[in-house]
């Protein structure tokens, strides 16, 4: 059996539900390509009876039922049902009758994948599921029912937070996240791909740890060569992924894409009100729902601004692939579809805008690994709150701190995140700028906490005199690969 990389907590939950002596109901959600289907199929391979129906995008209910019928006949081989069911209620009742003929000692896993596509408006699917679970499946001790979907907001609203007949019926729910850096490295090793951590980091800054994207990586190529293959040839899978990804997840994808494109222009994101003004829509528009759907799906994230209340929350674009696509693929897509030279991406590395993008992408990567940063600072057991901070100094240039970690032990880490290709050297002027930020932070926030300037870089900071007089701690890329957070 093909091994499942990482996902230790998820595998433990699946094992617990499978071993249960009563009926269990699990909901799984996570963005497309994150490995939901793979996890369920591989985990339950050769374990009991496994019945799977996968929803198809934008097809009629009759076609979905025909797909159900094909899977039903393939597993149960009931010749008395020669035609597809006409309704989902009829389909579920057929499934119930087939299960009743199986000995209760035999475990049965029922997997309905891409549930939002199965349960389209007026399909009758959710009503049928409600009925069959409450009336029959919940009384069958050998049944494990699993529903899965990529549209996170839909899954949360219609299943996890269901207020109808399925209210409180779930045994558990699982949000499947992209791989961390450590899991990405582990996945690559499992496929005989051994790259330096710098190159793994570069791949992560394009793929975001999405397993499907990582599956395209070839072992005999460098990270740069692989990125070229993934993104910059007419046959590249990530060249044409972008619009398919958003239009398959969101009903009104144009609005979602408008938000995404606006946020892509702002490194540290925007407040909700500023975003509404930029989009030129009324405050009573659908922006709240759009932001929620994008955040629940993992494309954007919100980060509190230290020193402000909830209204100071900033929304920023956090999906690595989307950031990469809008920066490097979208503006040149016509040219890329016609074909470019093999060293196209390698040449981009000397472009000044590459350094700007890499700095932003590395900062974004660090924000996704804050628990790793805390552990490296030896404050893993200390209660903390994280955010970013900005202020205007004497009406002039805005001053920012990339990551602020406020601690319950009356200390605050002011984290400066800096991407470099080698060891970073702190200059006199840069050291003075960091000390100025520290003074301004103390002055503006009126904090009484001890303040520590913390540098986060890929390969460390040279401990020259400026470092020794300015920096309290430093963290390197290796800390972000800590496997203890990869369960």
Image (cartoon, rainbow, N blue to C red):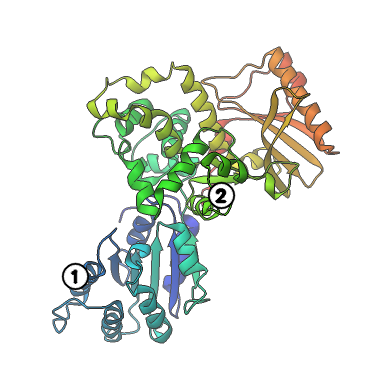
Identify the residue under disc 1.
70
Numbered tag placed on residue 23 in the rendering:
none
Residue 268, x across and y down, in percent: 59, 35
Q: CA distance from mark 1 to mark 2?
A: 48 Å
Quarter-of-image position of residue 390: top right
Which one is nearer the viewer's eye here, 217 or 240? Answer: 240
Earlier in the chain: of badge 1 and badge 2, it is 1
The answer to whether one can see residue 203 in this image is: no
Label 2's element? loop
The answer to whether one can see residue 451 in this image is: yes
**Residue drawn at (44%, 30%) of the image:** 202
Number of other residues with Cα within 10 Å of mark 2, as a class: few under 14, some 14 to 19, many 20 or more = few
Which one is nearer the viewer's eye here, 213 or 282? Answer: 282
**Residue drawn at (30%, 34%) of the image:** 218
Q: Is residue 372 left or right of residue 228?
A: right
Numbered tag placed on residue 282 in the rendering:
2
Residue 208, x across and y down, in percent: 45, 40
Q: Quadrant of the N terminus?
A: bottom left
Which one is nearer the viewer's eye here, 285 or 445? Answer: 285
């Amino acid at each position: 059996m093909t091994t499942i990389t990482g996902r230790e907590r998820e595998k433990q939950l699946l094992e617990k539900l499978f071993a249960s002596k009563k009926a269990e109901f699990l909901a799984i959600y996570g963005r497309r390509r994150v490995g939901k289907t793979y996890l369920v199929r591989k985990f339950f391979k050769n374990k009991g009876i496994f019945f799977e129906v996968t929803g198809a995008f934008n097809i009629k209910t009759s076609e979905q039922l025909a797909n159900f019928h094909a899977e039903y006949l393939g597993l149960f081989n009931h010749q008395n049902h020669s035609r597809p069911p006409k309704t989902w209620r009829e389909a579920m009742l057929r499934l119930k009758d087939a299960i009743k003929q199986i000995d209760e000692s035999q475990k049965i896993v029922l997997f309905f994948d891409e549930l939002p596509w199965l349960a389209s408006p007026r399909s009758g699917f959710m009503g049928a599921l409600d009925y069959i679970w409450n009336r029959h499946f919940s009384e069958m001790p050998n049944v494990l029912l699993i529903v899965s979907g990529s549209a996170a907001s839909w899954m949360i609203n219609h299943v996890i937070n269901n207020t109808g007949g399925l209210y409180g019926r779930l045994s558990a729910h699982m949000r499947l996240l992209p791989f961390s850096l450590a899991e990405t490295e582990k996945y690559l090793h499992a496929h005989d791909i051994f790259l330096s951590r710098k190159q793994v980091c570069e791949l992560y800054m394009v793929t975001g740890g999405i397993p499907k994207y990582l599956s395209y990586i070839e072992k005999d190529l460098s990270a740069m060569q692989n990125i070229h293959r993934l993104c910059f040839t007419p046959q590249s899978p990530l060249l044409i992924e972008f619009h398919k990804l958003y239009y398959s997840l969101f009903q009104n994808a144009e609005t979602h894409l408008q938000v995404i494109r606006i946020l892509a222009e702002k490194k540290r994101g925007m407040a909700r009100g500023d975003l509404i003004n930029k989009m030129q829509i009324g405050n009573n528009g659908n922006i709240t729902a759009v932001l929620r759907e994008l955040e629940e799906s993992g494309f954007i994230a919100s980060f509190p601004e230290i020193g402000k209340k909830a209204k100071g929350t900033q929304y920023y674009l956090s999906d690595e692939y989307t950031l990469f696509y809008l920066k490097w693929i979208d503006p040149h897509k016509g040219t890329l579809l016609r074909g470019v030279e093999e060293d196209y991406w390698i040449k981009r590395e000397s472009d000044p805008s590459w350094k700007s993008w890499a700095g932003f992408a590395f900062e974004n990567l660090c924000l996704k690994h804050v628990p790793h940063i805390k552990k490296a600072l030896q404050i893993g057991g200390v209660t903390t709150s994280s955010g970013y901070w900005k202020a205007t100094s004497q009406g002039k240039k805005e001053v920012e701190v990339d990551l602020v970690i406020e601690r319950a032990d009356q200390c605050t880490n002011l984290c400066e995140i800096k991407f470099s290709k080698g060891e970073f050297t702190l200059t006199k002027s840069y050291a003075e700028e960091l000390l100025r930020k520290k003074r301004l932070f103390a002055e503006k926030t009126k904090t009484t906490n001890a303040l520590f300037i913390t540098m986060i870089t890929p390969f460390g900071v040279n401990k020259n005199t400026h470092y020794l007089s300015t920096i309290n701690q430093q963290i390197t890329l290796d800390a972000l690969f800590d496997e203890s957070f990869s369960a």
